[in-house]
Image: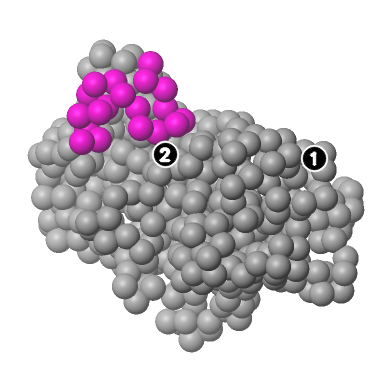
Amino acid sequence: MTLSVGDALIQRIAGKTATVGIIGLGYVGLPLAIEVCRSGYRAVGFDTDERRNAELRAHHSYIEAVPNEALAEFIGAKRLGATSDEKSLGECDVVIVCVPTPLDENRGPDLGHVLAASHAIARNMKRGALVVIESTVQPGATVDFVKPILDATGLRCGEDYFLAYSPERVDPGNQKHRTHSIPKLFAGVEAESTRVGLALYSRVFGRVIPVSSTGVAEAAKLTENVFRAVNIALVNDLKIAFDAIGIDVWEVIEAASTKPFGFMPFFPGPGLGGHCIPVDPIYLQWSARAAGAPSKLIDAASEVNDRMPHHVVERLGAELAATRRKDLKGAKILVIGMAYKPNISDVRESPGLEILDLLRRAGASPLFHDPLVDSLRPPWATDRDAAMRSSPLTAQSAADVDAALIVTDHDAIDYALLSKHARLIVDTRNAMRKRGLPTKNVRMA
Ligand code: SAJ
């Protein structure tokens, strides 16, 4: 009795003889490739950036969650490859797409990388392959945009190839939840794709949760991040209200957090950074608007969060005037922490970048100190400008500036030194009080 195409693939998956391709070797794809290898499969990593592939082949990891030793183990044993040659997709039984989904120039969904990966798969995939999209996309995108590209090969979905969606849930910098332990949503575009896909995902991830459609899985991922963006906007909004009332919002959140049910603390900050939380709500809003039912809260939250860098710079200006009789114009400001969140080195979409720009536009001379970010290209830089380097945090440098502005409170920063030598500290993260340091020269923003 000949096996169906699906059963034949499940047999290779169960026998660990299936080869798994991962397109996009970033903070999602590279940890996933390692997890696939750890599960006993041979993995082929695809990245258009040959520098990345060369780093990996040299067993040098550029992703904090992936140690060099893991690359040495699997690339050394030829169980993991790293290539930009799309022809190798033809040897893969499974192809998982983990490429970026940013915003386009009109601040709408940009599926360019997903579509390019889909076309590369269509040009090379073998009959009987399973394709899984993990990139964050708007509801309906897998069926509406990816499936037609793969159908154009003449292969039939659910019979000659299989297609599914499973949202990535990687949390950069999170030591507690790593790829294997995070529950994974999964949906095929039809029943056979679900059956075949679950056979692989249940062997790679600790807990896989099937949902009824790719649309539900796509929407669930966006909802998880809209939840964060709206709740962060709520506490940012309340910070401004409580400041005006004269109540400490940080203490209020700490007090409310004692409620053992029905409350989840979020904390005010200088704005929203990263490539998930600021972007995902816009993907969902784009679909909601196209369906004639735009969300009021998503727009309101974006407006509040987008305003925070301006609010922080205004508060800094007010505190400089009130405590040092100084204007922002001509002031030397040391911005502490440029990554978009504590204890990682990623500055993408960081509010710190906008704050540097706002300070410069106000006539201040901004510097930054970030122990995890050696240098960065400031927003105003032209191609000819050199990168801006992180300034050392010393007793002298802290005393030399007119104010220090805490934007991202990495654990590795010497707050005690800052407290002792800086004449004014404007703190957007409650970093000083959280560490029990004197707050005489500290103002909240
Ligand atoms: N932020 C606040 N206040 C908060 C929490 C965050 O101002 O209470 C700011 C952060 O400083 C940062 C931005 O919001 O600038 C986003 O922070 P985040 O903690 O949401 O971290 P991300 O962007 O790395 O989000 C990722 C997401 N993972 C995926 O999309 C797969 C998100 O779903 C995770 O829940 C989140 O990590 C996490 O929990 O850390």
Residue 356: image location, x then y, percent = 48, 60
Query: Which of 223 and 17 lies nearest the eye of the viewer?
Result: 223
Stretch in magenta: 51-69
Which labelled disc corresponds to residue 374?
Answer: 2
Residue 2 screen position, x and y as percent:
21, 32
Magenta-colored stretch includes residue 56: yes
Q: Amino acid at mark 1?
A: Leu
Residue 158 seen from this side: no
Amino acid type assigned to the residue bearing label 2 in the image:
Asp
The local crowd at label 1, few if under 14, some if 14 to 19, many if 20 or more residues have their Cα within 10 Å, is some
**Element type at mark 1:** loop
Question: In this rendering, would 172 be left or right of 257?
Answer: left
Q: Nearer the viewer, residue 48 or 190?
A: 48
Question: Can the viewer see residue 421 in this picture?
Answer: yes
For residue 7, side relative to residue 224 (left or right): left
Q: Residue at x 21, y 42 (%)?
A: 49
Residue 214 image point, x, y percent: 43, 58
What residue lies at 89% left-to-right and 49% top-to-bottom? Answer: 258
Q: Residue furthest bottom?
A: 292
At 43% across and 53% down in the image, what residue appears? 348
Is residue 118 found left or right of 188 in the rendered image? left
Residue 252 lies in what quarter of the image? Answer: bottom right
Q: Earlier in the sequence, mark 2 or mark 1?
A: 2
Q: Nearer the viewer, residue 218 or 414?
A: 414
